[in-house]
Every structure is written in structure tokens, then in C-alpha cells.
Image (cartoon, helix red, strand yellow):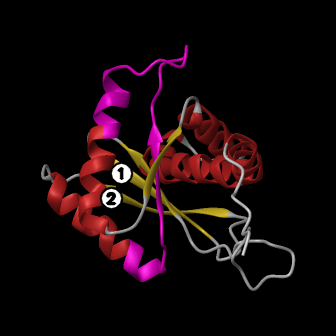
Amino acid sequence: MRLTGDPFGQVPIVRVLALDLGSRRIGVAVSDSSGTIATPLVVLQRSGNWRADHQRVKELLDEEEAVMVVVGLPLSMDGSIGKAAQAAIREAKALATVVGVPVETFDERRTTVTADQILIDRGIRAPERRKIIDKVAAAVILQTWLDGRPARAEHREREHPAAEDNA
């Protein structure tokens, strides 16, 4: 049973922030309010203090009126959870305690390579690419997440069908 006013049973989409976590920088992207298009937003320089960095992310969430964060999860190429992915999971959990909105991790394999190729294809030179690659990678993460939403929802529906209201 869907509890929504939409006659087509669709849940309204809201803005989502995505993060590409790095040791020196955090790439940030945001979706449009329809949940269709991801746009690179900003590259945050790490302060050396997770709490301060997470507070800056919270400020961006508030400014962008986003209600969820998707954090890139750097899985190994074989899909296993290595040290980098473990660190991202720890940071995502810490971030969730600061931002007060749902935080979800999402496979980010090859997103930096994809982002770099996008920038090369647009003729952006290496020095400029280095300045923006993190936010473009965050946009690739977010766009992939947005594009996969219907498939994930269908999978969840098959795995956990909603209980019908017998009243």
C-alpha cells in the first residue's frame, strides 16, 4: 500500500546531495528537485577535522534543501570492501550523526575515471581538471544513483512486498 497523494503511486522526489570523499578534498554534487539530473556543486578542502568537514556538508544540505546524502563507496574492483571502503563507511556513519538526514553509501567504482574522461572530452586541460574532478566524480556517483532508483525500488518491492491494508 502506498501512502501518497499522487494518483500514480509515485513518491515525490526531492534534492539529494552526493559526496566523493577523498583524503584532501570532498567532491559535492546535487540533484535537481525532480531527481533527474545531477550537477557538480563544489569541492571542499579537507580541514583535518571530520566534524568540521561534516558541519560544512550540513550547511550545504541546508542551502540546497537536500534531504538525503549519497556517499561514494570505493569498493575494490572485485566488489569487496577494502580499507578505503571501510573508511568511507565509517565516515558515512559519522556524517549521519551530524547532518540529521539519511546517509546512504553507493558503489563508486570507476567514477573518477569516468569523470576524467568527461572533462577530457570537453577539452579541459589537466591543471583545471584536477581542480574540479572531485565534484564531477560526485555528480557521476549521484547520476548513477538517480538512474538506478527505479531498479532498486523494484528489487525492494520484490524482496519485501508491502503489506496490504486489510481494514
- 56 left or right of 85? left
Magenta residues span 61-89
Instruction: Provide the secondary structure element on which disc 1 rests.
Output: strand
Q: Magenta span has 63?
A: yes
Query: CB atoms at circles 2 and 1 under 8 Å apart?
Result: yes
Q: How crowded is mark 2: few (under 14 residues within 10 Å), some or many (20 or more)?
A: some
Choose between 55 and 160: the one closer to the eye.
Answer: 160
Choose between 28 and 4: the one closer to the eye.
Answer: 4
- Classify 74 as above or below 2: above
Q: Can residue 128 be seen in this view?
A: no
The residue labelled by disc 2 is 44
The residue labelled by disc 1 is 26
Q: Quadrant of the C terminus?
A: bottom right
Name the residue at 32% across, 65% down: 57
Q: Which residue lies furthest to the right in this view?
A: 8
Q: Distance between the residues labelled 2 and 1?
A: 5 Å
Residue 47 at x, y = what percent?
16, 55
- 142 left or right of 83? right
Where residue 8 sits, quadrant-wise, is bottom right
- Classify 118 as above or below 142: above
Where residue 5 sits, quadrant-wise, is bottom right
